[in-house]
Image: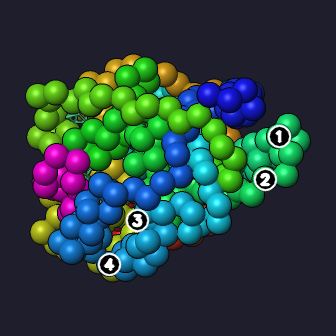
Amino acid sequence: MNTQKAKHTATVKQIASDLGFDACGISKAVFLENDAVNLEKWLNNGYHGKMKWMENYFDKRLDPTLLVPGAKSVISLLFNYYPEKMFDNEDVKISKYAYGQDYHFVIKDKQKKFMQALTEQVGEIEGRVFVDSAPVLDRAWAAKSGLGWIGKNSMLITKQKGSFYFIAEIIVDLDLAADLPTTDHCGTCRACIDACPTDAIVEDRVVDSTKCISYLTIELREQIPSSFKDKMEGWAFGCDICQDVCPWNKFSQAHKTQEFFPNPTLEHLHKNEWQEFTEEVFKEVFKKSAVKRAGFIKLKENINFCK
Ligand code: SF4
Ligand code: SF4
């Protein structure tokens, strides 16, 4: 490897560490051939449900050079959101990633700092940052760069600390040394498939979103079909079941990021208060939260549906 490439690669990894990212992997910015086949099949099966936007930008999802002209590398970043304690509320559950502030803003802010530091050290480069906000297959890139493997629950699993991570990417026209993918460590385990209450994991690594509680409680902008009535297990926003049962998540460690600490009101909300949730409480509790994505009416409907 030439010395400049090695130096730039070391710089990237150092900046990631300085900014508090838990892991950083690098891939060549090439067309994702295997993922193209899988994505097409998934869409053709209608597993994206009413998320019609997923049909758009098919090529851009797979080819980073269509997002950043001249792109050479994709930098994948992981940020831990595993909380110190779970909400002890049997009646209403929300996904751990939404306990604190909206990750889109928190992570994007860090990515902007990343680009600034990188430019300062390597000179002018073209690059774009993505966090669940543009047509980028984040898990595929993270797996390609060796940060983990795609588990049977379709999440990115790391051997070190499980799967409770936000994944972000930075696509740059900077030549960097690519990391090697890791091996799959699911083995004969099928805990996630067996635990899914709606049978949404239809085959290894394939989730039918139309059956997934995350989709039903966040993305679906209409009534949740009554066939799911007794299967929600209390989840009102998202669902962590297939991650909670994953043996690799025994290695999860609590994050220390202030922004992701739960809103104290949320932490102490009692069962009955959830049922009487008003728009004022919603605005206060979820002021900066990703739960705002669902909206007050949807969350209220979810709470009533899953109780
Ligand atoms: S998030 Fe919940 S509903 Fe969706 S696949 Fe996992 S266990 Fe099933
Ligand atoms: S629960 Fe088992 S099969 Fe599912 S992702 Fe984890 S290790 Fe893989």
- Viewer-proximal residue among 25 and 187: 25
- Viewer-proximal residue among 244 and 8: 8
Q: Is residue 28 left or right of residue 158?
A: right
Q: Residue at x 13, y 51 (%)?
A: 203
User: In what element is the residue under mark 3?
Assistant: helix
Tell whether label 2 touches label 1 (CB within 8 Å).
Answer: yes
Q: Residue at x 11, y 40 (%)?
A: 194
In this rendering, the answer to whether 127 lies above or below 28 is: below
Q: Is residue 104 visible?
A: no
Q: Could you tell me how far apart the alpha carbons at marks 3 and 2 are, in whole angstroms?
A: 37 Å
Is label 3 or label 2 in front?
A: 2
Which residue was labeled with disc 1?
A: 122
Which residue is outermost to the front?
Answer: 2
Label 4 amino acid?
Answer: Lys
Which residue was labeled with disc 3?
A: 218
Counting other residues with Cα less than 10 Å from the Cα at mark 1, is it few (<14), some (14-19), or many (20 or more)? some
Which stretch is magenta? 197-211
Is label 4 or label 2 in front?
A: 2
Q: Is residue 150 magenta?
A: no
Mark before the other along the chain sequence, 3 or 2: 2
Residue 185 drawn at (x, y percent) = 25, 26
Which residue was labeled with disc 4?
A: 50
Counting other residues with Cα less than 10 Å from the Cα at mark 2, is it few (<14), some (14-19), or many (20 or more)? few
Is label 3 or label 4 in front?
A: 4
